[in-house]
Image (spheres, helix red, strand yellow):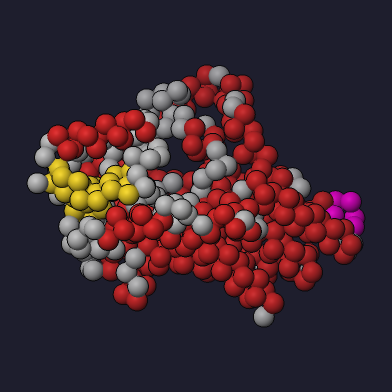
Amino acid sequence: MRVGAVALAAAVAYAVLGLVKLAGFRATTFDLVIVDQAVRNYANLRPPYIPVLGMSHGRGMEYVQLADHFSPVYALLAPFYWIHDGPETLIVAQALLFAAAIPFLWRFTRRVLGVAPAYLVSVAYALSWPIAQAAAFDAHEVMFVPLLTAIMIERYHAGHVPPAFLAMLALLLVKEDMGLMVIGAGLCLIVMGDRLRGLIAMAVGAGAVLIVRGLLITSFGGDSKDFWAYNHLGPDLPGAILALLRDPIAAVLLPFSEEAKVDTLFLLAWPTLLLCLLSPLSLVALPHVLERMLSDRAQWWQADFQYSAFTVVILFCAGVDGLARLLRHVKRSDDASLKLAWAAGACVVALTLVPRFAFDQLYHPSFYQEPKAAAAAEAVARVPAGVVVEAVNSVGPALTSKATVLLWSGDPKGSPWVVADVSRWEFPFGSLDDQRAEVNELQGQGYTKEFERDGYVVLRRG
């Protein structure tokens, strides 16, 4: 019951964070509308078209989500859209899924360290910065990963191998790179002595990566080049591997080559007081972490987005296991006070990191106030239902339940309606002046101004 209360409180906090941002027009078209369009189409028994991304990439209105990221797991959310059709459903579902990992993490920790440490570790996860950043940034496929990795690790540790492997296989339906995590799980099993299952897992993970990226995504209309983020190493995978082999010292140093990388790597390990580094469970996370740190995409290195939530449960479990291994090594495995001290330390670290990340907003009154929200809501109300509308990044989520939203980007798509903002910079424009110039350009092309307030402008094609 108590662990359920912890999970419920966490789910409420995550949902409040996301819903307040949505209500205050601080959610974004990229990525919340992308996911919303995919799930809505699943709910209506249609292919998961995401016109907002298809039109932005020049691939048309019938571009499917599976060509962008291979995430068929989104179909599981479709029935919830029969209850409430809108991005609020995604935010609540994400909150519940993140919190659902807590009972499994608690069970694993209780088995290894005891009851009191289990509660402290659960609270540390609930407050953890990777979950904070993911909950604050729209909704993403990562929502499924903490729960699946928690089930995988806890069930295997409990001796229930079939559900552990089912959870592992389910990861392959979350995203095209989750095969790397399955490879990491196989490597972990080999190190722990379960060689046959480990080899099978590594083979399945490698096969999944090759099939999904090389065949499935391209068959849905995607481009494999979209996923190649290692041009500094070579034009393709063989070239990158050869480059790393030619200069192994540079390869080892590459994950530490930028301050942002070092910062993120430290922040991943520090919540466990670095003890995750003592456990083979950390090998499950290693391929995904390397995928990020070896890339040429700076946003992947950052701690500001959702990427670290893929591995947060793995590293907490590794920290628990790392402490147990350390205590066995020093022949103090029955020392309850040290177990409790470490768990309390992990909880304190999580608390000290709260002000640096997204949960800090929850206790500031200004977070619940948005001076321009009334004007934005009025602009949204001026757009008729059932139309195609190009919307500024922060307004798209409020329109997606009633209209087909495309991203207003300075690349006109001929939509009958446009909702712009000329008072503050919005992605993907280069500057606020570019946004103002684009509004003037649209008016020169025959669009008429239907509404203007607090910087929001609604245009209709004449």
Could you tell me which residue is drawn at 40 percent across and 40 percent down? 424
Q: Quadrant of residue 117?
A: bottom right
List the single residue furthest toward the bottom: 1
> Which range is magenta?
327-332
Asked whether residue 435 is in view, the answer is yes
Q: Nearer the viewer, residue 275 or 299?
A: 299
* Quadrant of the drawing holding the N terminus: bottom right
Question: Compared with residue 232, is residue 99 higher up or lower down, i.e. above or below?
Answer: below
Could you tell me which residue is drawn at 55 percent across and 55 percent down? 367
Q: Quadrant of residue 313?
A: bottom right
Image spot of residue 8 (x, y percent): 59, 73
Q: How many marks?
A: 0
Image spot of residue 356 (x, y percent): 65, 46
Asked whether residue 198 is in view, the answer is no
Question: Compared with residue 79, is residue 427 higher up or lower down, i.e. above or below?
Answer: above
Q: Nearer the viewer, residue 443 or 269?
A: 443
Image spot of residue 131 (x, y percent): 57, 55
Question: Compared with residue 79, is residue 15 higher up or lower down, i.e. above or below?
Answer: above
List the single residue furthest toward the top: 246
| Left or right position of 58 against 380 | left
Could you tell me which residue is drawn at 71 percent across and 53 percent down? 350
Q: Nearer the viewer, residue 261 or 22?
A: 22
Q: Nearer the viewer, residue 437 or 7?
A: 437
Could you tell me which residue is drawn at 24 percent across and 51 percent down? 451
Residue 96 among those drawn in magenta: no
List the single residue furthest toward the front: 453
